[in-house]
Image (cartoon, grey):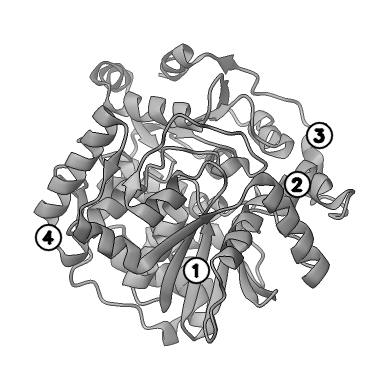
Amino acid sequence: MKYVSTRKGLTATGVQSVFMGLAPDGGLFVPVMDGVEPIDLASIKTLRDAETAVLARLFDDFPAQVRDAAVDRLLSRFPEKDPIALVEAGGMQILELFHGKTGAFKDVALSMLPVFMKHAAGGRRVLVLTATSGDTGSAAMQGFAGVDGTEVLVFFPNEGTSRIQRLQMTTPADANVHAVAIKGNFDDAQAAVQRIFADPVINAEAAAAGVALSSANSINTGRLIPQIAYYIFASARLGRDVDVVVPSGNFGNILAAYYAKMLGAKIGRFLCASNVNDVLARFVATGIYDPGDKFTVTNSPSMDIRKSSNVERLLWLVNGGLEGDVQAACAATAVLMRDLSEKGRYELSEKAKARLFADFEGGVATPSETEAEMRRMRDETGYVLDPHTAVATAVARKLGYPKAGRTLVVAATATPHKFPETCRNAFGGDVLGEMPPNFKELATLKQTQNQVVDLSGIDGAVRALF
């Protein structure tokens, strides 16, 4: 499998794309899907089958034993019987992606990424920089804890995460994982991390210290590719045409579903569900990406994002990548990203809009609508949603889904136990019962990660680990 960068078409192997994280031209690596054999859904009986099939196609330059080791590690960290469950509720199929160690869908790929990264590093020391709005950071710290030759540095907003999310990032005691709170939001953290990757001075200092910089964010193909498999798995289990709704922040999870369709999953429409930080919902509805200046801290904090990095991969696809025209896709993507940098917004061509609208639609749920949806779902079905998944089901219902004769798959991205405060607000009391043991013990652990910095202090926090 060949990977190319979205702006200049720089080529890389899968191994190289994982090791670098961000492409040297400032863009993201994407797989060139021409000629890739679709997956025979009839052959997919387990999550292992799905991951093995996806990795064999898109990470074929990783040795088979490395791919197998990554899948083994994933399955060892999820329930043995049904690691990713499908649960019918309210006429929808809830795809429960949250049964990993930190209770969020990020645990899937971040259980596997350390295996890929260690192989890709080839004995080199790697500092994995990560920006998080709440879930990626804890999953990265959990995934890389104790992994030889790697260190993880997570930047998270000092305000806006849930108490559980914060404790998951501030209590790890492993010497190779670090979390730093910033006086800013996720967009600030992500912008800083991407700037550091492109900074020749910092990179030279890192190289002189024998350190390579990489990422655990979804800009890294090692995050994106493993996520494709659970949509393949869901499609195979259901055995019929489905639509998918995904609560979306950085756009990686819904993009994984889009790649799953390219590999043979029977998915029709992709519903992009946003909270009031509605950049993505507006984009898929209009073809205009305009983050604006408004930012709101909500009760679905992992979606409190205005600048979603994975949209760049979709730009590449709808501007020629779907047809295999790498040159046209890169040229158009470079222009659009330059417009975003210089003008603060961009607009797709009419042809690209048509491609976008053919597959995607979106909608918004406010914080009050989110809590109302949590109550409605529990009252009518007994199923308790976390606030992010409630955004998804609320948006789906607004858009008239599920459609007659079609199954709607809801990506349930987190356990409600991560957001007990919002659950109490929504239900007027405690409906969750006893917390899972790994959450309950957080309150008893010593807080080992106490550093808080201004945005100007981010570079210094990175340099301190060289």
| Residue at which label 4 appears | 325
Assess disc 1: are there few (<14), some (14-19) or many (≥20) residues with their C-alpha within 10 Å of its C-alpha.
many
Label at residue 438? 2
Dot 1: element: strand
Q: Nearer the viewer, mark 2 or mark 1?
A: 1
The percent position of residue 198, horizontal first and vertical second, equals 27, 27
Labels 2 and 4: the sequence-earlier one: 4
Closer-to-camera residue (212/278): 278
Label 2: how many Cα within 10 Å (few below 14, some 14–19, many 20+): few
Q: CA distance from mark 4 to mark 3?
A: 53 Å
Q: Which circle's residue, 1 or 4, is located before the other in the chain? A: 1
Asked whether the viewer can see residue 55, the reply is no
- Disc number at residue 244? 1
Residue at image x 47%, y 58%?
362
Tell me the amino acid under the disc marked 3: Ala
Distance from label 2 to label 3 (Cα)? 10 Å
